[in-house]
Image (spheres, rainbow, N blue to C red):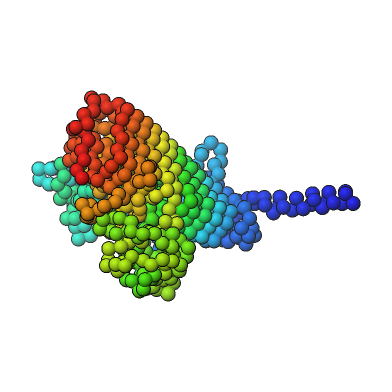
Amino acid sequence: MKKLFSILIIVTLAFVVSSCAEKVYHASDFGIVPDTGKDMTKAVARAIETIKEECGGRPATLLFEGGEYDFYPDSANVREYYISNHDQDNPKLVAVVLEGVKNLKLKGISKGESLRRAEFLMNGRMLPVAMVGCENCTLDFIGIDTRVPQITQVEVLENDAENGFITYRIAPYVNYKIADGNLVVYGSNWEFTPRWGIAFDGKTRHLVYRTSDIGVGTQNVEEIEPRVIRAPWKDARLVPGTVVAMRPYVRPTPGILVSECKNTTILSSVVYYAEGMGLLAQGSENITLDGFQVALRGENDSRYFTTQADATHFSGCKGVIRSVNGLYEGMMDDAINVHGTYLRVIKKLDDNTLIGRYMHPQAYGYYWGGSGDAVQFVRSDVMEIVGDNKVVSIEPYDKEQFSGCKEFKIVFEKPVPADADNGKYGIENLEWTPEVYFAGNTIRNNRARGTLFSTPKRTVVDNNLFDHTSGAAILLCGDCNGWFETGACRDVIITNNRFVNSLTNMFQFTDGIISIYPVIPNLKEQTKYFHGGDGKGVVIENNMFETFDAPLVYAKSLDGLKFCNNKIVTNNDFEPFHWNRHRFLFDKVKNVVIENNDFQGGFDEADDVKYRF
């Protein structure tokens, strides 16, 4: 009897182990072969559907041999996706779709010593990878790029500044034509004339000092030889050898979309180009990026740019966002932006019921929250919290379904503010706010800012290199007036980082290398503090600042700041120009400690610290 019982246990354990064992699939078994130039869209869709059917959510890996896999718009998966901080034009054309998938890993594998990722290459305007409603899914050693990027790169050959003409050479990858005197660039399913650009130093790849966003010479042009254009364009800063990334301001899709997912992991993967963010995550819980990059193809890459917007962007997420060992360069916005979205109260139906609306044209239609979520109200003119509450129920108000809606009817557990319908209130969802750990990353040669955090949960920024981030290196924001991005930061630790020559250009919120800048239209009437409080606030400790200019920290409406044990080294790499001539400039800030820092050239508190409110 004991022997029979032992056999039953062994058989049962074997069944359990086999049922939980990861099943491995090879993409080549589905006809998915690299370096052919053939369209792999339908074959990849078949492979994913087969795995879903056969594994039923049990662990599985789909292996892609290293090399290039092409995807084309004509056979794309057509989806209606509303994506935070992107253009809400639908439908989207999607290359790789993971919807409702559990425990699946897409993994690139190298052959021999080549160390080639499995690279997904778009042949037109497409969303490369969409992960929607997934759980425990992973991308590992995957690359994402576009054959013909929408950013047009040119090199300045001659600059006749006196007469207002520049001659430039168009990069080989660009498709272009001259129509009615305009430079028109195009791909298989897009076409436009660039109007704006970013200038890079041809040797260092840094953004050109004091250029910011520039107008570009693309009208009334003359082609003087193939790919060489002479254009009316007066800008003496663009010396021969300067590389200009001409771009539109549209951002239709990110490189990777993570929407309403749980436990997502991205390992050793690269987005070389995307027409929006590199990665956009929304309404998702627990995201790990380890060795993720938005980067060039090495030091000899002919391109100087990567993404049209942020490298990574997290909207309305919760749990833990962990981003470590990454490289973010050449993008047209931040390396990381973490925030929620304020709904503006537009109507009060009764004491417990409001209509809330998404306000920004690039922020609507996606998941905002559900019943049981903790929320708080904020007065947008002074950015003061005026009461907490809980959602009893939420339903779409301007559409029959949640997808694509801008307005919600929300019933709350407790009465709402009596004057909530005066157009001055926002609603912040506190349930969908994450902890953030951002460590061991390099951010360099990008437009606008290095990092942006707007979450009340603990945020740790540790051991990163901020190298010529152009604008501010770190921004803590909060805005219920323009971007409508929440929220107040309560516990931020900035430690062991190295900051090299930030603030070479002026963009929004570039008032210090570290800028704590909530948007508060009526600061003088604010009676509370937006950031900090509870004895915590912002700690800046054991960092190295290498700078050519004065500003280190700007802060507004902050309770609690420690700037301790930092080293500040002044260089002559650029001429100082910033309007802020104080090391520390504070507007309505209290509980400040500045001590035990090493300032090259000394520190004079009377001159270096300025309180304006």
Picture residue at 27% right of the left edge, 27% below the top: 599
In the rendered view, tell whether residue 292 sits above or below residue 575.
below
Q: Nearer the viewer, residue 441 or 430?
A: 430
Q: Which corner quadrant of the image does residue 297 belong to?
A: top left
Picture residue at 21% right of the left edge, 40% below the top: 611
Q: Is residue 238 left or right of residue 445?
A: left
Farthest left residue in view: 162
Query: Residue 147 at what x, y percent from top left?
Result: 40, 51
Query: Residue 228 at what x, y percent from top left?
Result: 23, 47
Query: Residue 402 at what x, y percent from top left?
Result: 43, 69
Farthest top residue in view: 601
Quadrant where the image shows the C terminus: top left
Residue 37 visible from this viewpoint: no
Picture residue at 42% right of the left edge, 74% below the top: 400
Picture residue at 36% right of the left edge, 71% below the top: 351
Q: Is residue 124 left or right of residue 4?
A: left
Q: Nearer the viewer, residue 558 or 504?
A: 558
Query: Residue 490 at what x, y percent from top left?
Result: 38, 47
